[in-house]
Image: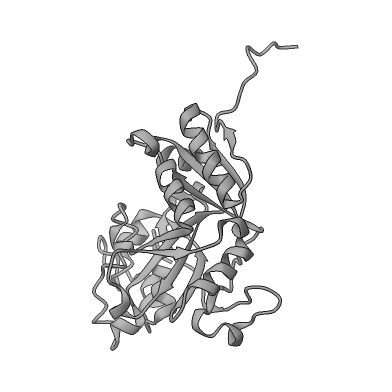
Amino acid sequence: MVKNASKLKLVHFLPITVNHVLNAHDIKNGTVYQKTANRIGGSYYYKYMDLNAALKCMNNGNIRFVEPSVWKDQYEKRFYNADYSRVSSNPSQHAPRLYASCFSNQKDSESAWQIYAYGKIGLGSVCVQFTIDRKALRSELVRNVKNCEMYEGEVTYCRKYIIDNLHSPVYLNNGNPNPDYGTFFKPFDRDKYLNLLLLKREAFAHEKEVRIFIVKDKKMMRSKDKFVKVDWSKIVKGVRVDSSISNEDYEKLEKSCRECGLPEPEKFDVYGDDGGRLVIL
């Protein structure tokens, strides 16, 4: 094995049950798929939003999905914007346009609390966290999203060097064979494309991100985002908001939570209260 060589694990997507009643054949127009390896553990996802987005989603009864082309991180949308014509005879089928929404397995993520309010003003300067029942979310998506396929999977974190070279059969800096190229592109199909969209630089591993993709017919993708109807009272088990929130803004959030049938929002300080000066005993 040459220096810097990698061997990323490829994970296949297969139908999964949404609950104990539905199976892949029952779902029909809204089949949900999940990675078969490294199955996502736990019962909950955590969805972080700024207060402005949270209020809009709650008041409109939806969750926002976006086309990856609008993601800010160039490395995250690198493989979404790529040209697959050399590795696929049918790029539109193997690498379709789609929508995505991001969640986390990490309940207390300092970076998430900071990034969703960073550089924003007004209602956008406060972060809100929703504790979401994963099983209930799947059921809501299957109920409300038609004529499509949905996939979910945990993000794979790897070195920037690996992502930089993944599209080439050989490493660009030394010409040595790239073992990951064959894994993802020989042959190339929908599974491998979705795996590419789950790659992220290891500097962000603390996020423990999970992504849900909605694949629709190309003709139906008329905008860069899609708002999927959900019953918030069925999927949300807890609401936390940055303790820096003003009383006025907290009342707005509390009102929306009450009208949506959600728990009263808890004020949260990611850095905690030290309880005063520590006395060494």
User: How far from the left and from the top, in percent, is residue 106?
Assistant: 57, 48
Q: Residue at x 34, y 84 (%)?
A: 93
From the viewer's perspective, tell me whether residue 165 is left or right of residue 30: left
Q: Residue at x 43, y 66 (%)?
A: 1
- According to the image, what is the colour scheme of the structure? one colour
User: How far from the left and from the top, in percent, is residue 113?
Assistant: 48, 39
Query: In this orientation, does residue 206 appear?
Result: yes
In this picture, is 253 found above or below 196?
Answer: above
Q: Residue at x 26, y 70 (%)?
A: 82
In this picture, is 276 found above or below 64?
Answer: above
Query: In this orientation, does residue 244 appear?
Result: no
From the viewer's perspective, tell me whether residue 234 is left or right of residue 58: right
In this picture, is 186 found above or below 105?
Answer: below
Q: Quadrant of the C terminus?
A: top right
Q: Please state which of residues 230 and 127 is positioned toward the viewer in this rendering.
A: 230
User: How far from the left and from the top, in percent, is residue 81?
Assistant: 26, 67
